[in-house]
């Protein structure tokens, strides 16, 4: 089943993204910033893998995770988000590897990749 997981996405953006996804029959799940110790796969299943005591806060950055979204829908969603000016800090695709990561690990990896891209961009200038 095609799903989007919205992490720390503001209410207005969430409504816009939900509208885009509904037209494609894509399920949208949303969580706040206290899911750092939760495993991505659990969140995509609509569950929390950590107890209330174990919850870890994430850095203040919005994230959209695409899970089992067809190539056609993926491209369309990205295009529609871009043309409607819906910007989020990070976009990721759920893979067999990262599905077993905690959200904190996923955020760290996204931050590391962003830093690498920025360094590579500065070297080309």
Image (cartoon, grey):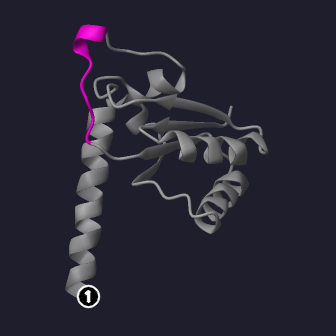
Give the image location of residue 114, x and y in percent: 29, 61
Q: In this figure, which residue is indicated by the disc labeled 1?
A: 124
Query: Is residue 57 found inside the magenta-colored segment of the image?
Result: yes
Task: Tell me residue 63's x, y (percent).
Answer: 43, 45
Camera-side residue of 66 and 89? 89
How packed is label 1: few (under 14 Cα within 10 Å), some, or many (20 or more)?
A: few
Q: Residue furthest bottom?
A: 125
Residue stretch rendered in magenta on the structure: 52-59
What residue is drawn where x is 32% and y is 14%? 50
Could you tell me residue 104's position as x and y percent? 27, 34
Judge from the rendering whether residue 48 lies leftward or rightward of residue 124; answer left or right: right
The quadrant of the picture occupied by the C terminus is bottom left
> Residue, x 31% and y 51% (percent of image)?
110
47, 59: nearer the viewer: 59
In the picture, measured across the screen, residue 30 lies left or right of residue 106, that is right
Magenta region, mostly helix, strand or loop? loop
Between 64 and 66, the one lying in front of the other is: 64
**Residue 2 point in image, percent of width and height:** 67, 37
């Amino acid at each position: 089943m095609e799903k989007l997981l919205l992490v720390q996405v503001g209410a207005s953006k969430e409504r816009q993204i939900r509208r885009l996804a509904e037209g494609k029959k894509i399920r949208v799940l949303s969580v706040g910033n206290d899911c750092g110790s939760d495993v991505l796969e659990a969140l995509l299943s609509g569950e929390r893998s950590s107890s209330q005591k174990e919850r870890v806060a994430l850095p203040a950055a919005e994230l959209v995770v695409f899970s089992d979204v067809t190539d056609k829908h993926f491209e369309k969603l990205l295009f529609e988000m871009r043309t409607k000016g819906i910007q989020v800090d990070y976009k990721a695709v759920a893979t067999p590897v990262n599905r077993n990561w905690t959200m904190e690990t996923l955020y760290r990896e996204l931050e590391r990749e962003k830093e690498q891209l920025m360094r590579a961009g500065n070297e080309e200038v």
